[in-house]
Image (spheres, helix red, strand yellow):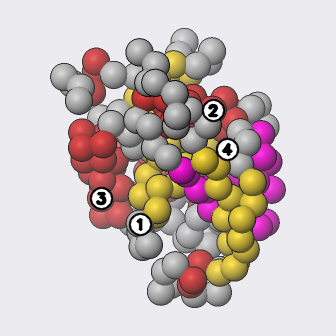
C-alpha cells in the first residue's frame, strides 16, 4: 500500500500522524509506564517492556497490512512525541476501535481531538472503514468529550469483562460512528 513508513504521514495544523519507528520505543515506554496515563487503560498498572514492544510491532504490521494503525502523534515543528492516535483492533471480539493516548504535558490543549479527527477522516475517506467504535472507562471524561466532539454516540455501557477475560469488572462505555462517506467515491 505504501512504499515505506517514511513516505506516509497524516497532517493536521499542529501534528504529523505517522507510522512507528523503533526509535519511538523510549517515548512510548514513558507513556505506557505513566500511572496517570494508564489509570483508564490498565487500571493504573504500567505495561511491561515486552508488551510495549509487542504493541509497537502490532501497529507496524497493521499499518503495512491494512493502511491504518494507532499512529505516532508528533509535533510538526519540534518533532516531539505527543502520543498516539488511530484505529486498532479491539481483541477480542475483533471490532475496529479508534483511540488515543496523549502525554500528560499536552493535556487540555485539544490535541486528542485534533489528532482523532485526522485519523477518523483517513479511516473513513481513504480506507473506507464502514464503522468504528471507541471504548473508554466512564470516569475518563476527557476521552468521552473527544468522542462527542468527533461525532460518536454512546451505544452501550458495561464491563470490560463483557469483551475480555480480565479485568472482568472494569466499567466501560462504548461509542460508535458509521462512515458518512460510505456511499461516495474515495477521495484522492
Q: Is residue 104 above or below residue 168?
A: above
Name the quadrant containing residue 172.
bottom right
Q: Earlier in the sequence, mark 4 or mark 1?
A: 1
Q: Is residue 49 above or below residue 4?
A: below
Q: Is residue 2 visible?
A: yes
The structure residue drawn at horizontal position 58% and vertical position 19%, both measured from the top left corner, is 12
Q: Is residue 139 magenta?
A: yes
Local packing at callout 3 (Cα closer than 10 Å; few below 14, some 14-19, many 20+) is: few
Local packing at callout 4 (Cα closer than 10 Å; few below 14, some 14-19, many 20+) is: few
Assess whether mark 1 and mark 2 are in contact (beta carbons under 8 angstroms).
no
Q: Could you say where residue 161 lies in the image, as x and y percent from the top left?
A: 56, 84
Marks 3/1: CA distance?
17 Å
Q: Could you say where residue 48 lies in the image, as x and y percent from the top left?
A: 39, 66
36 or 136: nearer the eye? 136
Residue holding disc 4 = 104
Q: Nearer the viewer, mark 4 or mark 2?
A: 2
The segment highlighted magenta reads 131-149
Marks 2/1: CA distance?
22 Å
Q: Could you say where residue 3 lies in the image, as x and y percent from the top left?
A: 19, 22
Amino acid at each position: 500500500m505504501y512504499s515505506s513508513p517514511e513516505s506516509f504521514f497524516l497532517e493536521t495544523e499542529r501534528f504529523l500522524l505517522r507510522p512507528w519507528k523503533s526509535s519511538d520505543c523510549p517515548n512510548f515506554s514513558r507513556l505506557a509506564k505513566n500511572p496517570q496515563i494508564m489509570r483508564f487503560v490498565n487500571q493504573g498498572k504500567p505495561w511491561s517492556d515486552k508488551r510495549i514492544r509487542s504493541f509497537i510491532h502490532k501497529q507496524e504490521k497493521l499499518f503495512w497490512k491494512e493502511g491504518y494503525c494507532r499512529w505516532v502523534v508528533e509535533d510538526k515543528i519540534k518533532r516531539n512525541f505527543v502520543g498516539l492516535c488511530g484505529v486498532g483492533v479491539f481483541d477480542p471480539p475483533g471490532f475496529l476501535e479508534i483511540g488515543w493516548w496523549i502525554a500528560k504535558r499536552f493535556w487540555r490543549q485539544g490535541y486528542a481531538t485534533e489528532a482523532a479527527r485526522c485519523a477518523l477522516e483517513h479511516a473513513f475517506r481513504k480506507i473506507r472503514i464502514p464503522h468504528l467504535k471507541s471504548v473508554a472507562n466512564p470516569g475518563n471524561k476527557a476521552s468521552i468529550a473527544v468522542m462527542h466532539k468527533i461525532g460518536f454516540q454512546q451505544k452501550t455501557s458495561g464491563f470490560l469483562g463483557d469483551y475480555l477475560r480480565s479485568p472482568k469488572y472494569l466499567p466501560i462505555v462504548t461509542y460508535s460512528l458509521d462512515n458518512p462517506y460510505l456511499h461516495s467515491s474515495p477521495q484522492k
